[in-house]
Amino acid sequence: MTPTAGPERAAELIAAARAYVDALVSHDPSGVALHPDCTRTEMGMKTGRNGAHLARSLARGPQYRLIHRISDFTAEVDGHMVSTRYWVHVRPKTLGLAAHVTESFVVDEDNKIRAIVARFGVPRRKT
């Protein structure tokens, strides 16, 4: 956490990022504050072109329908950047597969997500 981001501000930034992560499971983007110009880059490739596109993907994207749970969520704040780490658990549940995700969020002064950068590992067995 930088000196400019006190505990209350850090909590607001983390809440913005956490709302996005929670929507990966719920498929309900209504609680996610995406800036209209928000972009998402995944493994170096642009996968979200704007806030509306990202919201539609969260709601209906088949790539997110496989996700049934998030675990071990952690977040750190540095200025306007929230760096998160968590495990995303995918269907079918009986296989117990999960992938480790590192995702960074740039959150503006209005608590809107402006950019998301994601990297993830290969799914492996994790209970």
Image: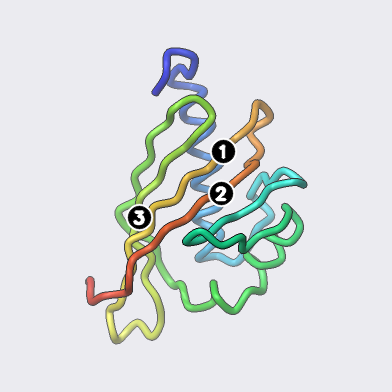
Establish if 93 lies above or below 56.
below
Mark closest to the chain's N terminus, 3 or 2: 3
| Tally of marks | 3
Residues at circles 2 and 1 in contact by the CB criterion of under 8 Å: yes
- Who's the residue at 65% across and 51% down the image? 39
Judge the density around disc 3: few (<14), some (14-19), many (≥20) Cα neighbours within 10 Å: some
Tell me the CA gap for discs 2 and 1: 7 Å
Q: Nearer the viewer, mark 3 or mark 1?
A: 1
Task: Look at the numbered disc 3 and give the secondary structure of its residue.
Answer: strand
Q: Which mark is residue 106?
A: 1
Which residue occupies the foreground of this view, 127 or 41?
41
Q: Quadrant of residue 35?
A: top right
Task: Of the two numbered discs 3 and 1 on the same chain, state the one appearing first in sequence.
Answer: 3
Q: Which mark is residue 116?
A: 2
The amino acid beneath tag 3 is Tyr
Q: Residue 85 location, x and y as percent?
A: 35, 50
Residue 12 place in picture, x, y as percent: 53, 31
